[in-house]
Image: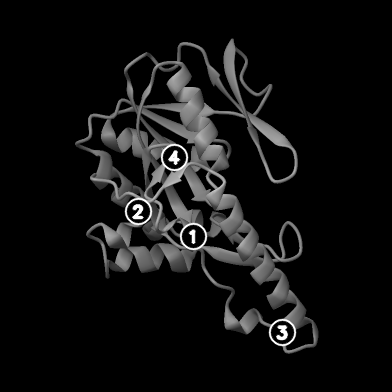
Amino acid sequence: MFAEENGLKGDPRLQAISQAIRVVPHFPKQGIMFQDITTLLLDHKAFKNAIDIFVDRYRDMHISVVAGVEARGFMFGPPIALGIGAKFVPLRKPRKLPGEVISEKYELEYGSDCLELHIGAVQPGERTLIIDDMVATGGTLSAAIRLLERVGADVVECACVIGVPEVKGHCRLNGKPLYVLVEPREIDSSLRCDCSSVSADVKKEENLRRKVMTMCSSYQFSPEWAST
């Protein structure tokens, strides 16, 4: 679910968070409107707003583990963990962790990837929150859920700063609640170009949007609303 649908409708903090996120057109490739959260980190008030909202939500859920997905989940996970009195555990890409690990592979649109977790970092039964910066298709978060459940973690919820509009009707991912602060920002009108290529770019963006919707339907999203 989105924060505005869960008691924060009209909260000025959400607008401040959204406005602090920069849109970079056609990065890393043509047709992608990249949501750059580094500008959110530059705005200490907006960044604090994001952390405060997450901390307020999870403070009384008895969560003992905050698991951050590489790499931008590492930026939000530690302050949330400190705020709720939990430990932070990184979920890393292959060959980044020095100790013995357990791995979970997952499919991308082109190829595959993998998340790894230090064995012993999470104990069976520990209530766990998964944090990342953005959810689109849900593939990475689904892999994170599977990885943590393999070591016996009780995954309470997945949380992201940004979520594509297509996930609005899907409050659960692999049966786990999904909580999102804001939708992706649109490109500023001042950055738009009045030239013959605009219509082609718009068409590419629409095709990409449809592709994301198709990819969303391929993962285990459930339309039921979360109770938390």
Rendered residue at 57%/16% (across/down): 102
In the image, taking residue 206 as reference, residue 129 lies left or right, namely: left
| 94 w.r.t. 190: above or below | above
Rendered residue at 60%/20% (across/down): 103
Label 2: which secondary element: loop
- Amino acid on which the number 2 mark rests in the picture: Met
In three-dimensional space, the C-alpha distance between marks 3 and 4, rounded to whole angstroms, equals: 36 Å
| 15 w.r.t. 133: above or below | below
In the image, taking residue 51 as reference, residue 39 lies left or right, namely: right
Label 1: which secondary element: helix
Rendered residue at 22%/59% (across/down): 7
- For disc 1, the marked residue is 166
| 222 w.r.t. 191: above or below | above
| Residue 127: % across, % down | 31, 25
- For disc 2, the marked residue is 1
Between marks 2 and 4 in the image, the one whose residue lies nearer the viewer: 2
Q: Are marks 3 and 4 in contact (CB under 8 Å)?
A: no
In three-dimensional space, the C-alpha distance between marks 3 and 1, rounded to whole angstroms, equals: 27 Å
Q: Earlier in the sequence, mark 3 or mark 4?
A: 4
Label 4: which secondary element: strand
10 Å crowding of disc 2: few (<14), some (14-19), many (20+): many
Q: Earlier in the sequence, mark 1 or mark 4?
A: 4
| 169 w.r.t. 204: above or below | above
10 Å crowding of disc 3: few (<14), some (14-19), many (20+): few
Label 3: which secondary element: loop
Between marks 3 and 2 in the image, the one whose residue lies nearer the viewer: 2
* Residue 131 disc label: 4
* Residue 193 disc label: 3
| Residue 202: % across, % down | 69, 77
In three-dimensional space, the C-alpha distance between marks 2 and 4, rounded to whole angstroms, equals: 14 Å
- Amino acid on which the number 3 mark rests in the picture: Cys
Quadrant in which the C terminus is drawn? top left
